[in-house]
Amino acid sequence: MNNKAKENVDLYLVAQEQFDRALTWVDDLKTGMIDAFRNPRRTTHVHFPVIMDDDSVQMFHGFRVLHNRARGPGKGGIRYHPSVNEHEVAALAAFMTWKTAIADVPFGGAKGGVVCEPKELSRAELRRITRRFVIALDDTIGPHTDIPAPDMYTNEQTMAWIYDTFDVMHPGQNNRAVVTGKPIELGGSLGRDEATARGCLYATEQLIRRGMAPGIDSIKGASVVIQGCGNAGATAMRLFHEAGARIIAISDSTGGIYAKGGLDPAATLNFKKEHGSVVGLPDTTTITNDELLAIRCDLLIPAAMEGQIRTDNAGAVQAKLVVEAANGPTTPGADNILRSNDIVVLPDIVANAGGVVVSYFEWVQNLENQQWDLDKVQQRLEKRMIKAVDTVVDLWTTIQGDERAPYGTPTLRDAALVTAVKRLATVTMQRDIWM
Ligand code: NAD
């Protein structure tokens, strides 16, 4: 039977299904509050014209979804991609609400995007698109309302343009905190570029220390497979390797490579830089992304994109632990299959929260006109990731035997979402926003 055709991997539906599942373990939430948490508070659509390098004028469509800001200003990335759409961005904005709640940083959740093909745009065109987008968003973003960050195909240069445009629009005040992920010289935080992967490492180490990854005693000596070789995946390869793991496979959008004895991260990244892909690195076997997901290993780190582990391929996964560096890489159907095969999943809203934690550090440094040293950033990140994992594992421990129809017993993802929903509910009730 072909399950692939039957499964809907739309990220919005995935997010809704995960939310519905988790609510089964939250007994005392008002119906109205559930509706408020389910839906975004605001979706801003903007259409703006940009002059292109060939002197033509093109219209672009961008949007920003603010899912919730009861715990603080909206926070979340902006992606540039031809297939970016409101549905996907709304799901990612909700993930940000849950992530910021679990990491206990004083933000809500938001996400944005512009429909465009960045690979076909010049630097000057990207700059003009970014500036027009910020002008069109107007005061819906701001240091205390909604704070963007990089995401797919946006980077520190994009953030510098966002800051500069907003600063021109709001002269005479410190505007650095309007956006995170900026270049260091412009108020970016040391350690932000590797924060997601470093957070993943700290979270994984703590999960192992808590005995939640049966069959894995330590990162040292563990075999690791990574899907994706961008900011999250490439940095995870380096950091997990430095922590003593053996990286036996990695992939990018063109395919993957496997080396039983382990890859050398520096050589792999140099090769990718030179040839545009990891595929073809000497002394490795070329594999497909599907083959990569099925490699027997201790840790599988999906670090590419959503909807990668589905009902049609989850049964082939032979990892002991899946660490979701990417957002939404596992569908709910795949979650069930992994669970029945005793494969633990450290969910995205915990595993990749390091990025938003260091974004929070950047925001604090900007508001105080400070620059923390790297040690301070890393120590504080580690402390927060350990606390986030402990909170989720502690809650999971209290509800683990609690079977609720039709879902059975809770997973770590359920425990993480329950933690986030309860934190958001507490603040919402304290603010008494209903009257
Ligand atoms: P990126 O654009 O830097 O890298 C993405 C990588 O995935 C590239 O190497 C690309 O070649 C690869 N890829 C694309 N399609 C693929 C496919 N079908 N199979 C295998 N590889 C494929 O993006 P990133 O910033 O590393 O983000 C990756 C994931 O991590 C996304 O889901 C993102 O939302 C999530 N994430 C990133 C951060 C961050 O700080 N960068 C924070 C939280 C979550």
Image (cartoon, grey):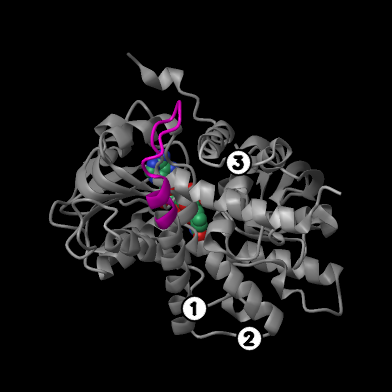
Q: Residues within 10 Å of mark 2 (few under 14, many from 20)?
A: few
Q: Is residue 371 visible?
A: yes
Identify whether 136 is placed above or below 166.
above
* Residue behind mark 1: 377
Q: Closest to the observer: 289 or 335?
A: 335
Amino acid residing under circle 3: Ala
Q: Residues within 10 Å of mark 1 (few under 14, many from 20)?
A: many
Secondary structure beneath dot 3 equals helix
Q: Quadrant of residue 357?
A: bottom right
Note whether residue 82 is visible: no
What amino acid type should be assigned to the residue bearing mark 1? Val
Residue drawn at the location 66% of the way across and 55% of the way down? 426
Mark closest to the chain's N terminus, 1 or 2: 2
The mark total stands at 3
Residue bearing mark 2 = 370
Residue 117, given in percent of the width and then of the height, sits at 60, 43
Name the residue rendered at 32%, 36% in the picture: 339
Magenta span: 394-409
**Residue type at mark 2?**
Gln
Dividing the picture into quadrants, the one containing residue 318 is: top left
Mark 1 falls on what kind of element?
helix
Position above or below: 382 against 263? below
Q: Which residue is mark 3?
A: 91
Label 2's element? Answer: loop
x, y percentage for residue 50?
78, 49
